[in-house]
Amino acid sequence: MLYIKNESQDPYINQAFEEYVFDRFKGEDVLLLWVNKPCVVSGRYQNVFEEIDIARALRENIPVIRRNTGGGTVFHDLGNLNYTIMHQAEDGEMLDYDNFILPMIEALNSIGIPAHKRRTSDIAIDDKKISGSAANVSHGKMLHHGTLLFNTDMSLLHGLLSGAKGNFVSKAIASVRSEVTNIKEYCEIETLEELKEKLLKAFNVTEEKTLSEEDFLQVRKIAESKYMTDEWTYCRGPKFSHTTENGKTEIFVEKGIIIKSNNPELVGMDAKSYFGEIL
């Protein structure tokens, strides 16, 4: 397995880094281990306003990012280790989460972490979630990525993973709320870096590579043209309606813009401003 090193902690760069590697590296399985500064990452088919406290995220300058894969919304910080496994599929091979989750559980068990599978895409300890994951298949390649909560700020996690109050109606994929815990409470590993190094050994990494400066310029272009934009993050979700808790204000949103409301002054406003600054 090839390990591609990524020392960035920029959430936008790291999302683009993953996309770039997935699109360009062919023929061999690839492992990424990476860390983000505090951010919230939603699934591709979710309504970020229903999943995330947008006002708090904007107020505290915490990036909100929409990823390429489905699944639920997750919180990343410097106490969380993200992993990505890319696999070149054989003819007729179907995506099976177990082919990715079970090797990760085996690796965690081998370094003294009592992890077990819970649900299709979760890893847990004592039935408390330590990892949620999602996957994507494109042009004969499979990408599976997930979180590993090592020493995450649980207060910030719970505070941000809470959407606007009131009633939403949409066809968006909703996150499944779960009780979570930190790996550090269940093992003798002291630091995230130590966890990272032990996992690299457990996965029997045979080759390590670093992207060139030219590669990284392309990564930055992807970050700037896609992941840093409001069009990708806030306008790509499904259309929805929202009614305030007191029932006084109702809005209808399509492509990130309020297209109808019982308050005419709101029509034409972008939903990011409404949920982040006005509501």
Image: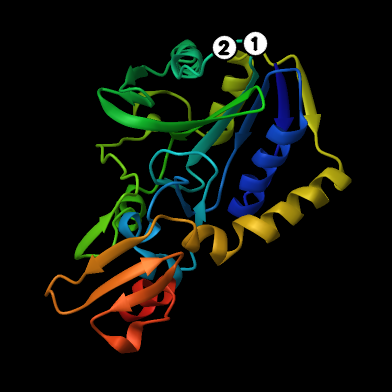
Residue 101 in picture, x, y percent from top left: 46, 19
Give the camera-side residue of 261 and 119.
261
- Identified by mark 1, the residue type is Glu
Residue 180 in picture, x, y percent from top left: 29, 36
In this rendering, the answer to whether 195 lies above or below 89 is below
In this rendering, the answer to whether 54 lies above or below 31 is below
The label shown at residue 90 is 1
Q: Residue at x 44, y 13 (%)?
A: 109
Give the camera-side residue of 266 and 205.
266
- Identified by mark 2, the residue type is Glu
Asked if residue 12 lies left or right of residue 155, the reply is: right
Q: CA distance from mark 2 to mark 1?
A: 5 Å
The label shown at residue 22 is none
Q: Residue 48 falls in which quadrant of the image?
A: bottom left
Under tag 1, what secondary structure?
Answer: loop
Q: Residues within 10 Å of mark 2 (few under 14, many from 20)?
A: few
Q: Residue at x 28, y 65 (%)?
A: 241
Q: Quadrant of the N terminus?
A: top right
Give the camera-side residue of 112 and 118.
118
The residue at which mark 2 appears reads as 93
Q: Quadrant of the C terminus?
A: bottom left
